[in-house]
Amino acid sequence: MKTGIIGLGAMGFPIALNLYKAGHLAYAWNRTRATTEALAGRCHNLAIASSPAALAARCELILISVSADADVRQVIDALLPAVTPGTLIVDTSTISAVTARDMAQRVAAHGAQFLDAPVSGGVEGAKNATLAMMVGGDVDALEKAQPVLRTIAQHIIHMGPSGSGQATKAVNQIMAAGINQAVTEALGFAQAMQLPLDKVIEVVGSGAAGNWFLNHRGSTMAQGSYAPGFKVALHHKDLAICKHMADEADIPLPITEMTLMHYKNLIETGYGAEDISALFRLKKPCRD
C-alpha cells in the first residue's frame, strides 16, 4: 500500500525509516519542514508533501504520529477534505479513547477507515521495529494494514472497536507509572543502604523483581543520566488522560495521581524533557 506518514518526532522519525526500508513509505509531512528534509536526505525518492491534504490525496494508508488529542484533531481536519474513499488512517499517537472514537466517526463519514493504534516500546522499539501495537477499530481494516504495520511493530493485537486501542494504552501507561515508582523508590532505598547500585541492578534484575525498566534504565539512573527514552512531559500528558478516563468511570488511581504530582515537580524544575527515569532524582538520598 502506498503509505504516507504525518509526524516525525522521536517516534515518528524511526518509524518512517523502517517503513521506507520495507518499501512502503512514499510521502511524509511534518510541521517542521527541516525534519522532513532530514528524512528525505536518508530516503531516496521520498516525496515531501506540501500539506496533510496533499499527502492524503496520494496515499492509500496514512500513519499519524503526533503528541496529543489537539494535534490529532488538527491533522484529521487538515487531511479529510482530500481523503479518498477506502483510505486507511492509522493513528499511533497516545490520545483519549473519546477522541479516537470521534475521529473514527468523522473519517467514516468520508468513506475512509480509522484505526487507533497506539504503540509501546519507546524510542528503542521504534528504531528496532519491535513495538507493541494495541489496535481499536474494524478488524478487516487492521487485516488490510497488517503488511505495512508488521514492518514497524513486532506485536500487533486487535483490542476491539474504536477507542479500545487507546483504552489499552491507558492500561500500559498506568502500569508504567507504577513500575517507575517501584524501581526508582527501590534504588533510592538501595543507595540509602549504601549498596553498590550496579550489583543491585544485576542481581535483582535476574530474579522475580526483574523488569524491562530496571534492565534498560537501571544503569543509566545509577550514572545520573536521563536521556530519553520516554519524556517525563509526555508521560505526564498520558497519565492526565488516564486520570480523566478513570474519573469518568469513578475508578481511583492513587499511584497515577502520585506520579502526576512527581512529574509536575520535575517539569517545574526543568526536567520535563528527560526520560521518565528522572523520577530517581526525587527518590535518591542525595537529590540533584
Image: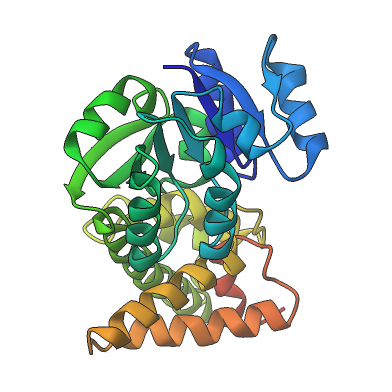
Q: Extreme right residue here?
A: 34
240 or 45: nearer the viewer: 45
The image shows residue 134 at horizontal and vertical percentages of 28, 47
Residue pictured at 65% horizontal, 79% vertical: 266
Check the image and report above or below for 149 versus 157: above
Residue 202 shows in this picture: no
Residue pictured at 43% horizontal, 68% vertical: 180
Residue pictured at 55% horizontal, 32% vertical: 56
The image shows residue 106 at horizontal and vertical percentages of 39, 53
Give the number of callouts: 0
Placement of the C terminus among the 4 image quadrants: bottom right
Check the image and report above or below for 44 versus 242: above
Residue pictured at 80% horizontal, 37% vertical: 33
The image shows residue 95 at horizontal and vertical percentages of 44, 62
10 or 229: nearer the viewer: 10
Check the image and report above or below for 18 versus 218: above
Placement of the N terminus among the 4 image quadrants: top left
What's the coloring here? rainbow
Residue 55 shows in this picture: yes
Horizontally, residue 16 falls left or right of residue 85, namely right
285 or 163: nearer the viewer: 163
The image shows residue 280 at horizontal and vertical percentages of 56, 73
Check the image and report above or below for 159 versus 146: below
